[in-house]
Image (cartoon, grey):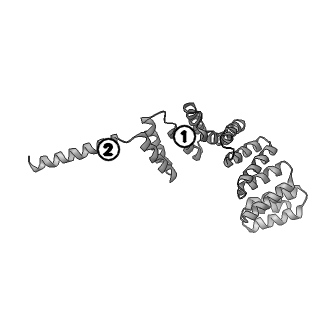
Amino acid sequence: MNSFNKIAIVLIVLFLGKVNTYAQITYQDLYKSALLNESVGDYKLALQDIDNALNLNPQYDSALFLQATIYVKQGEFKLAIKLFDKVLKLNKDYQEVYYYRGVAKAQTEQYIDAIKDLNKAIAFDPNFLKAYYNRALAKGRLDDFKGAVEDLNKVIELDATYINAYYSRAFWNDMAGNYDQAIADYQKVIGLDASYKEAYIGMATAMYQHGDKKAACETLSIATEKGSVMAEEIKNKICE
């Protein structure tokens, strides 16, 4: 056998080895690759991996779930909801689906259905902080300010440093006309993060509604000094 034939045989063996290696890639391998790409924010590659995994196993609920959560992050809420529905048809006990579908439904203003899903998420895990937080937002959108505040009370009970929970509780108390409670929570937010401009504006609004124009204008001045254009605009309207 001449040297040319030997080289040709070696190349064929190497090629066949590569083909065999690719043939051994499983849908689980592709799913792991998708997880890795998703974790670094490369959603395009992650979705490609998921598509390839689903070509090998169309009933792979974990891949469908990951695909749906990526769509949520991309703002494709209706597509995500359809995929979450499909996951639950395959596995009705897939706990995480209820939370994420609830979030997606809230984003599409399906607040009642969102609350139902978040209720199920909380039933699976009574200490599911984010489920309480998002359920509070949905309740607030339905003008259930009392229910929203109760859920946010639970969030703060679970994590006393959750700054957005204080801000949201202040907002819904403000909407309900509970100005003293709202002001106290806005002050708590500012105590945790003095650069939280929206908290100054919210507190000033509550103060103004409560009849304390002087305090409201002083608070708006602080927010203006911190660079809030909105605070300056409001200050110019109500403090002259």
What is the crowding at mark 1: few (fewer than 14 residues within 10 Å), some, or many (at least 20)? Answer: many
**Front-lying residue, 128 or 41:** 128
Q: Which residue is identified by label 2?
A: 21
Q: Find residue 8 and name its label.
A: none
Tally of numbered tags:
2
Identify the amino acid type marked 1. Answer: Phe
Across and down, in percent, residue 11 comes to 21, 47
**Front-lying residue, 52 or 147:** 147
Eyeballing the image, is 216 above or below 28?
below
Q: Secondary structure at mark 2?
A: helix
Across and down, in percent, residue 220 comes to 80, 63
Answer whether residue 239 is visible to the viewer in this image: no
Q: Secondary structure at mark 1?
A: helix
Q: Which residue is identified by label 1?
A: 65
**Front-lying residue, 68 or 229:** 68
Across and down, in percent, residue 229 comes to 73, 62
Q: Quadrant of the C terminus?
A: bottom right
Across and down, in percent, residue 238 comes to 85, 60
Identify the amino acid type marked 2. Answer: Thr
Q: Residue furthest top?
A: 89
